[in-house]
Image (cartoon, grey):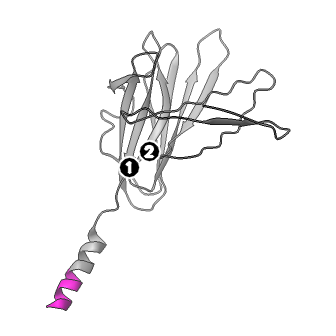
Amino acid sequence: MKHIIQATFSFLLVWLPVSAQNLIIPHIVDGGGWQSTFVLTNTSANPVSATLIFHQQTTDNGDTQPWNLTIQEVVSTSGMTLAGSSTLFLTTSGTAATTTQGWAELNADPAVVGYVVFNDHLPGHDDQEGTAPTVGSANRLMVPYDDSNGFVTGIAIVNPTGSPQDISVGFRTTTGLVATGT
């Protein structure tokens, strides 16, 4: 009996699905000339599923609400299947007259990695473009930046919980000096 239970338990472990990962895309934008393109890559040889959930910023202090963002390539971003070793490109419509910003959750198999590219190609203006990777919770994050020659670096931070969080920021100059703040 002991061997049957052990064999059954071992068999069940082999067939348990790999748990999903919950990642954050800290900044997306759509409308007013802006479009966002989500790039999701399945790094495994097997088909996997992924779901994108969008949150629209509603106030200047960062409050959000669920966002039914229109994606050109799919009707729904829930339960999408990515073939083995494939990349899926999903683009927002960008047709709204006003600009809307927010963030997204990516709930997917651990083999899925991704990022978003957001761009503004308004006629008569210089093109603008940015990117944001999918990231998990982190206690520390390093972001290289270059503010020389008119370049500007922006950093988007999302708190997906309902609780306030403290954030400390440190800057290291090319001479090695460090300035910090909260």
In this figure, which residue is indicated by the disc labeled 1?
Answer: 108
- Horizontally, residue 125 falls left or right of residue 18, namely right
- Horizontally, residue 110 falls left or right of residue 142, namely left
x then y, percent, for residue 74: 34, 34
Instruction: Give the total of numbered labels.
Output: 2
Q: Report the front residue among 106 and 62.
A: 62
Q: Report the front residue among 57 and 88.
A: 57
* Residue drawn 39% across the image and 17% down it: 58
* Residue 70 to residue 139: above or below: above
x then y, percent, for residue 112: 45, 51
Q: Report the front residue among 99 and 137.
A: 137
Circle 1: residue type: Ala
Circle 2: residue type: Leu
* Residue drawn 70% across the image and 24% down it: 152
Q: Main secondary structure of the magenta part?
A: helix
Q: Quadrant of the N terminus?
A: bottom left
* Residue drawn 38% across the image and 28% down it: 55
Which residues, given as a range, are shown in magenta?
A: 1-8
Q: Are marks 1 and 2 in contact (CB under 8 Å)?
A: yes
In this figure, which residue is indicated by the disc labeled 2?
Answer: 23
